[in-house]
Image: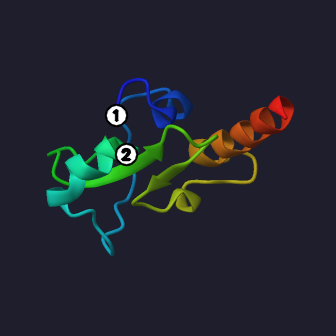
């Protein structure tokens, strides 16, 4: 989603990851979840599956329905890992 944290760390609105299909968000609860602070920041191409969520009020919370470690390398960390580290450093500087 535009303006989301994951949009910022990926630098793109369209990403490609290998979906992990073990757990899903029940679409009947999506509106209630969003009303209570969960930001849905990534959907499958057809818009039916929630792929990524965030909590805006948290210093840096992002959760995904895939395995970012599959694309991470020692010399090229996955964007979500880089975002988490950057968020932790920013949070530490603010305290």
Residue extending farthest to the bottom is 22
- Residue at 56% across, 48% down: 61
Which residue is labeled 1 in the image?
A: 14
Which residue is labeled 2 in the image?
A: 16
- Res 86 quadrant in image: top right
Q: Residues within 10 Å of mark 2 (few under 14, many from 20)?
A: few
Q: Position of residue 20 (x, y in %)?
A: 36, 67
In the displayed structure, 74 sits above or below 15; it is below
- Residue at 54% across, 39% down: 57
- In what quadrant of the picture does the N terminus appear? top left
- In what quadrant of the picture does the C terminus appear? top right
Element under disc 1? loop
Q: Position of residue 94 (x, y in %)?
A: 81, 30
Q: Residues within 10 Å of mark 1 (few under 14, many from 20)?
A: few
Q: Which mark is residue 69?
A: none
Q: Is residue 28 left or right of residue 13?
A: left
Q: Position of residue 76 (x, y in %)?
A: 68, 45
For this rendering, which residue is in front, 86 or 15? 86
In the displayed structure, 5 sits above or below 3; it is below
- Residue at 38% across, 39% down: 15
């Amino acid at each position: 989603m535009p303006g989301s944290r994951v949009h910022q760390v990926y630098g793109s609105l369209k990403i490609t990851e290998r979906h992990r299909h073990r757990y899903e968000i029940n679409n009947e609860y999506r509106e209630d979840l969003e009303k209570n602070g969960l930001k849905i920041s990534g959907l499958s191409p057809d818009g039916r599956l929630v792929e990524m969520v965030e909590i805006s009020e948290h210093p840096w919370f992002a959760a995904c329905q895939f395995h970012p470690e599959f694309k991470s390398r020692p010399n090229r960390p996955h964007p979500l890992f880089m975002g988490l580290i950057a968020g932790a450093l920013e949070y530490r500087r603010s305290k």
